[in-house]
């Protein structure tokens, strides 16, 4: 499993595009995985024949584990001594040596892309003692290894799990160990169900509360709730049904990361939200004029485009709103660029990709960037890099008919703007009550670095621009 360069530790295999015996070429997409950031397609960096798929679809795999082995010579690998296969096989997955007392794990890490070699690293784990009576991994027979085999998956001896004949230290990831400590669970008493005998979070929870809670009867879900839950259920694998009246969906991947980030944001940054309701009729007229003109021909023109442009102009007038709080250095970091994030609801959960250097784009360029960003997110092809480095976010809840909301800050940003539904309402215009198109904006900001004056001035500027869109020119 490759490291996509964002410090992620695991990914779920969503889909295999090849099967054992298939011929693959350099650069061919062989599988799709979902990290905590996004769904990513993985290419193979050489030609050959697929020998084995080491994990089925729906399995969560740690970065560095071998997920596919390929015979680079094509067809079945010829017989050869193990020593001759080692230089190639070890480049992807070195076979573990027998565990000895006070033996440190080897330095370095597995390849950044499958088959591209090992990236150097100074990371060193704590020495691990061998389990008493543990049996080392058996050597690979000569007929099972060949110079053409790129990777040979090796199983972890069951005795290292603490449940084999010799006992030993149970296998579990650091977060699982912390969970066990918090719940007062002795890992030596937990029966592992993960791959290669690894203890999972579910195993710890089961040990902490082995007796299942009784199912509480509840009214059947309404048609609206079913329509919302169905896409999410279709994306989750596996789905564990505990009763005919309820369905449990595992929280993983993007949805899990988003939940953790939102909880961290809500309890770290002191949120303040301000609201403004105003007449956006002139901006809506401008949208229609741009649609029928030649300057924006072939481009998508909608209210969100002009709202995004208004935000960029308001940021230029109030640059302190575009900042971040550096807790470690106890500094406010002012950003002299705007990477404009757009919150997008997708079947995989909420994604917030951003337009890099949006402040430097013309209106046609911004329109093209918005269209590409949204279509890519809806297709589930957003890359982790596209969601990194955002400085300000817009979330458009108005598309769901919602008047407004109190948005939670995207981690690392100082402000987020929620756009409400645009509705025809009675409004006082030029001294008379007339039907006008009205909307509400809600600005949430981090009160550690944005005070009430700055937040109010910024929000008022955005509303003023959208009330009189000619200010897009005069204030730019």
Image (cartoon, rainbow, N blue to C red):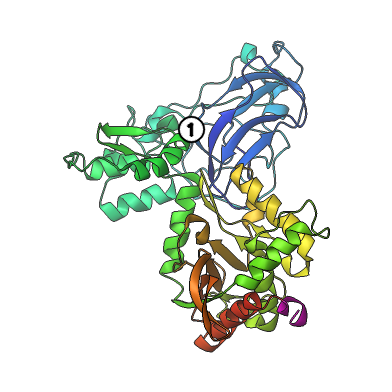
User: Which residue lies at the image location 69% right of the left edge and 56% below the top edge?
Assistant: 370
Residue 283 part of the magenta segment: no
How packed mark 1 is, by other alpha carbons closer than 10 Å (few <14, some 14-19, many 20 or more), is: some
Left-right relation of 305 to 135: right
Q: Position of residue 231 (x, y in %)?
A: 46, 39
Residue 473 part of the magenta segment: yes
Q: Tag 1, which secondary structure?
A: loop
Q: Position of residue 418 (x, y in %)?
A: 52, 67
Residue in the foreground of this view, choosing between 434 and 134 = 434
> Which image quarter: residue 197?
top left
Q: Position of residue 428 (x, y in %)?
A: 51, 81
Q: In this rendering, does residue 389 appear at all?
A: no
Q: Taking 345 as reference, is 451 above or below it?
A: below
Q: In this rendering, does residue 106 appear at all?
A: yes
Circle 1 sits on which residue?
59
Q: Which residues are magenta?
A: 470-476
């Amino acid at each position: 499993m490759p490291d996509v360069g964002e410090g992620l530790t695991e990914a779920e295999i969503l889909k295999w595009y090849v099967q054992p015996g298939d011929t693959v070429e350099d650069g061919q997409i062989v599988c799709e995985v979902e990290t905590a950031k996004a769904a990513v397609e993985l290419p193979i960096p050489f030609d050959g024949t697929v020998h084995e798929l080491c994990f089925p679809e729906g399995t969560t795999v740690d970065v560095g584990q071998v997920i596919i082995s390929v015979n680079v010579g094509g067809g079945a690998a010829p017989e050869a001594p193990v020593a001759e296969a080692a230089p190639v096989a070890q480049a992807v997955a070195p076979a573990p040596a027998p565990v000895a007392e006070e033996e440190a794990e080897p330095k370095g890490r597995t390849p950044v892309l499958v088959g591209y070699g090992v990236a150097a690293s100074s990371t060193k784990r704590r020495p691990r003692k061998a389990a008493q009576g543990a049996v080392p991994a058996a050597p690979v027979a000569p007929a099972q290894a060949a110079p053409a085999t790129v990777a040979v998956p090796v199983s972890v001896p069951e005795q290292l799990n603490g449940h084999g004949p010799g006992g030993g230290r149970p296998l579990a990831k650091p977060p699982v160990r912390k969970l066990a400590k918090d719940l007062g669970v002795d890992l030596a008493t937990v029966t592992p169900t993960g791959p290669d005998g690894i203890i999972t979070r579910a195993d710890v929870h089961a040990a902490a509360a082995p007796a299942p809670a009784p199912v509480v009867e509840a009214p059947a879900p309404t048609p609206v709730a079913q329509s919302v839950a169905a896409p999410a259920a279709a994306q989750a694998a596996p789905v564990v049904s505990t009763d005919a009246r309820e369905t449990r969906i595992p929280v993983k991947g993007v949805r899990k990361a988003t939940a953790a980030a939102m909880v961290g944001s809500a309890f770290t940054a002191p949120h303040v939200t301000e609201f403004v309701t105003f007449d956006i009729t002139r901006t809506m007229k401008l949208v229609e004029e741009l649609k029928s003109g030649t300057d924006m021909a072939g481009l998508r023109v909608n209210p969100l485009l002009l709202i995004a442009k208004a935000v960029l102009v308001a940021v230029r007038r109030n640059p302190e709103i575009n900042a971040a709080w550096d807790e470690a250095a106890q500094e406010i970091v002012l950003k002299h660029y705007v990477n404009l994030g757009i919150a997008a609801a997708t079947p995989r959960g909420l994604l917030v990709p951003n337009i890099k250097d949006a402040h430097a784009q013309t209106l046609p360029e911004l329109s093209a960037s918005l269209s590409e960003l949204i279509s890519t997110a809806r297709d589930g092809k957003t890359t982790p890099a596209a969601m990194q480095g955002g400085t300000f976010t817009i979330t458009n809840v108005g598309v769901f008919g919602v008047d407004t909301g109190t948005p939670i800050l995207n981690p690392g940003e100082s402000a987020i703007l929620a756009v409400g539904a645009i509705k025809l309402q009675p409004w006082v215009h030029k001294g008379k009550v007339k039907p006008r198109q009205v909307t509400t904006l809600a600005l949430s900001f981090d009160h550690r670095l944005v005070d009430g004056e700055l937040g109010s001035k910024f929000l008022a500027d955005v509303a003023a621009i959208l009330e009189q869109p000619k200010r897009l020119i005069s204030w730019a």
